[in-house]
C-alpha cells in the first residue's frame, strides 16, 4: 500500500499544484483503474497520498481519516511519514511527531530502523541544498 501511495502521491498535480495532495486523494479514491485493490485498500492508498505533504492527519478535522479504524489511522500516519521522509518534505517535523504519537515501538520496531536511516538520508540530502 505504501508503494502504491508513493507512486500515486503526485497524481493530483494534473489538476493543480496547489493542494495537489487533496486532488490526489480525490482522484485515487474515485478511479476505477486500480484493479487488484479492495475498496478499503484504495482508501488507505488515497490517504497516504493525501498526507504525503502539508498537515498531518487529524481525526478532529479530517472526516475521511476519522472514519478509519484506529489501526488503519496508525498505518496511514506511519506510511505517510515514511513517504515524507523519502520525499524530503519540509513538513517532516510535524509528521514525525504525529508518527511518534501513533506508533507503538514494539509493533513498529522494524520501522524504527527505517526512520533512523531515512532521517540520516534526509539530513545528508539537505546538506547538499
Image: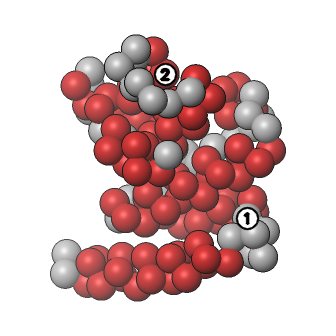
Q: Position of residue 63 (x, y in %)?
A: 70, 25
In the rendered image, the vertical position of residue 44 relative to residue 98, given as above or below = above
Residue toward you, 110 or 56: 110
**Residue bearing mark 1:** 103
Q: Residue at x 19, y 81 (%)?
A: 128
Quadrant housing residue 125:
bottom left
Q: Position of residue 29 (x, y in %)?
A: 48, 22
Residue toward you, 88 or 33: 33
Q: Position of residue 9 (x, y in %)?
A: 36, 41
Mark 2: secondary structure: helix
Q: Residue at x 43, y 76 (%)?
A: 118
Residue toward you, 37 or 17: 37
Q: Position of residue 101 (x, y in %)?
A: 75, 63
Q: Residue at x 28, y 77 (%)?
A: 126
In the rendered image, the vertical position of residue 119 relative to residue 53, given as above or below = below
Q: Residue furthest left?
A: 128
Mark 1: secondary structure: loop
**Residue bearing mark 2:** 29
Quadrant housing residue 100:
bottom right
In the rendered image, the vertical position of residue 114 relative to residue 25, given as above or below = below
Q: Is residue 90 visible?
A: no
Is residue 62 shown left or right of residue 94?
A: right
Amino acid at each position: 500500500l505504501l508503494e502504491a501511495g508513493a507512486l500515486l502521491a503526485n497524481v493530483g498535480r494534473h489538476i493543480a499544484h496547489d493542494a495537489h495532495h487533496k486532488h490526489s486523494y480525490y482522484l485515487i479514491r474515485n478511479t476505477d483503474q486500480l484493479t487488484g485493490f479492495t475498496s478499503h485498500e484504495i482508501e488507505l492508498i488515497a490517504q497516504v497520498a493525501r498526507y504525503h505533504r502539508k498537515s498531518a492527519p487529524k481525526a478532529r478535522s479530517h472526516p475521511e481519516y476519522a472514519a478509519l479504524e484506529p489501526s488503519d489511522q496508525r498505518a496511514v500516519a506511519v506510511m505517510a511519514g515514511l513517504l515524507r521522509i523519502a520525499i524530503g518534505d519540509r513538513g517532516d517535523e510535524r509528521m514525525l511527531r504525529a508518527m511518534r504519537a501513533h506508533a507503538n515501538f514494539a509493533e513498529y520496531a522494524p520501522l524504527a530502523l527505517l526512520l533512523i536511516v531515512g532521517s540520516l538520508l534526509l539530513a545528508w540530502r539537505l546538506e547538499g541544498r
